Image (cartoon, rainbow, N blue to C red):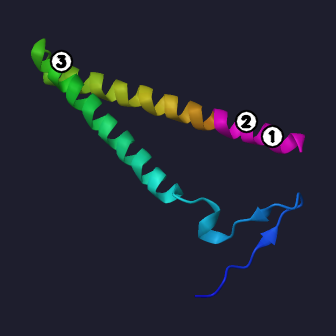
C-alpha cells in the first residue's frame, strides 16, 4: 500500500485528494434520489387513491396528477435557480 501524498491549502491545512475529498457523497446522493423517487410514487398513488375514494373520473384524475407533477417540477426548477443565484453571488464577492 502506497502512502497518500498530502498537499496543503493556502491556510496550511491539509487538502483531501480525489475520491477522499467528499467521503460518503455518492451514498448520500443515491439516498436522496431514492427518497425523491419514492416520494413521487407515494404522491401519485395518494392522488389516485383520493380520486377513487371520491369517485373522480379517470381523465380528470389524470389532469390533477399532471398538474401536481408540473407544480413539483416548477418548485424544483425555482430551487435550482435560487441555488445557482446564490452560488453566483458568492463567486462575485470573492
The answer to the question of whether label 1 and label 2 lie on touching residues, with beta carbons closer than 8 A, is yes
Answer left or right for 56 relative to 72.
Answer: left
Task: Using the image, tell me which numbered label, if any, was put on residue 50.
Answer: 3
Task: Compare marks 3 and 2 and give the one earlier in the sequence.
Answer: 3
Select label 1 or label 3 by which is in front: 1
What is the CA distance from the residue labelled 1 to the residue labelled 3?
45 Å
Residue beneath label 1, please? 90
SS at mark 3? helix
Q: What segment carries the magenta color?
A: 82-94
Quadrant position of the N terminus in the picture: bottom right
Task: Using the image, tell me which numbered label, if any, was put on residue 86.
Answer: 2
Answer left or right for 57 relative to 43.
Answer: left
Answer left or right for 64 relative to 86.
Answer: left
Answer left or right for 14 relative to 34.
Answer: right
SS at mark 1? helix
* Residue 89 forms part of the magenta stretch: yes
Task: Compare marks 1 and 3 and give the one earlier in the sequence.
Answer: 3
Characterize the local packing of mark 2: few (<14), some (14-19) or many (20 or more) Cα atoms within 10 angstroms. few
* Residue 20 forms part of the magenta stretch: no
Amino acid at each position: 500500500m502506497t502512502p497518500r501524498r498530502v498537499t496543503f491549502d493556502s491556510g496550511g491545512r491539509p487538502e483531501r485528494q480525489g475520491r477522499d475529498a467528499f467521503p460518503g457523497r455518492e451514498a448520500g446522493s443515491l439516498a436522496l434520489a431514492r427518497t425523491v423517487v419514492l416520494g413521487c410514487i407515494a404522491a401519485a398513488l395518494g392522488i389516485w387513491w383520493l380520486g377513487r375514494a371520491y369517485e373522480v373520473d379517470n381523465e380528470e384524475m389524470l389532469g390533477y396528477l399532471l398538474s401536481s407533477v408540473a407544480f413539483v417540477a416548477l418548485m424544483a426548477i425555482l430551487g435550482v435557480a435560487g441555488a445557482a443565484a446564490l452560488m453566483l453571488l458568492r463567486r462575485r464577492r470573492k
